[in-house]
Structures are given as C-alpha cells and as structure tokens.
Image (cartoon, grey):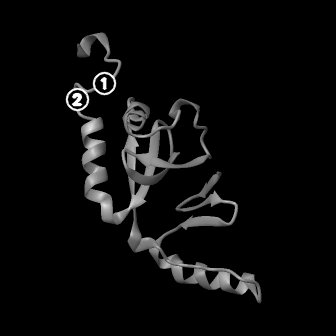
Amino acid sequence: RRIAAEGARSVAWMSPDEFLLMLPPDGVAAALEAGRQAAGDGFVTLADVSAARIAFRIHGPRADEVVMKLCPVDIARLPKGEIRRTRAAQIACALWRSGEGGITLLCFRSVANHAQALLENAARPGSAVFPEPSES
C-alpha cells in the first residue's frame, strides 16, 4: 500500500498484483509500451484508465476532519507514502497524503459530481466536529 512520487509522476501499489501509474497525459503511451516491452513473454494486463478516474485534493487545517467524516479510515495514523483503498460514504475510492496538510482522493469519474458534493458538504463552514472556540 505504498505510493511513491517523483515530480509529476507517481506510482501506487494498489494490491500485490496491481499498481497505478499517475503521470502527465503525454507520457501514457510511452509508459504502456515500456510496460509491454518489460513484460516480454510474461503475462501482463496494461490499461489506460485516465478517462475513468478523477482526483480531488483536500487541503487546509481541517483536511483530515473532512476525510474522517466520509471514510472509515483512521486518517490521523495514515503516514505519508501510504495509499488506502476505502469508501467515501458509498463511493469506492483510494486516498493518500499529498503534501503538507493535503490528502488526495481518487474515485471513478462517473461519480465525480456526487463525490464533489460530499466533500463540499463535509468541508462546509460551521460543520466542524470539534469547532474552535471562535467557531461556536
């Protein structure tokens, strides 16, 4: 369940036999071909799923709280560099820490509007689970 990043490229180990490359659109064809070449005669399935996924960046001082409202994950214990497959409400997703105070949530594009509405509602001003005294 690791994710490694170098510049605009990332690789996430989603399961023992599945990984997800995240890279600029102009690098997809070359990466697919490199994977085919590296596999040689071995069995491998390579697929461009770019059009099927969307990523949301949740950032700010309450990013963890927004995710905790939606996902059954102890987000406070999620270290940088680890990816988790889970659910945001009833939406299958993956998430990881991305930068200082940020979390990236990846889900199917077909539920993007629903995911965005859930995230916006969870981040709505005045919805803090543990509000600061000045927010009460």
Q: Amino acid at mark 1?
A: Ala
Q: CA distance from mark 1 to mark 2?
A: 7 Å
Q: Residue furthest bottom?
A: 41
Identity of the residue drawn at 43% across and 40% down: 71
Q: Give left or right: position of 18 versus 118.
A: right
Q: Nearer the viewer, residue 93 or 4?
A: 93
Q: How many marks?
A: 2
Q: Residues within 10 Å of mark 2 (few under 14, many from 20)?
A: few
Q: Residue 96, percent across and down? A: 52, 46
Residue at 51% from the left image edge and 34% from the top image edge: 75
Q: Secondary structure at mark 1?
A: loop
What residue lies at 28% left-to-right and 44% top-to-bottom?
Answer: 118
**Residue drawn at x 24%, y 48% as measured from the top left:** 117
The amino acid type, in three-letter code, at marker 2 is: Pro
Quarter of the figure that contains the C terminus: top left
Looking at the picture, does residue 116 appear above or below residue 76? below
Q: Is residue 131 above or below residue 22?
A: above
Q: Which mark is residue 125?
A: 2
The residue carrying pointer 1 sits among few (fewer than 14), some (14 to 19) or many (20 or more) residues within 10 Å by Cα, namely some
- Pinpoint residue 95: horizontal percent, then vertical percent: 49, 48
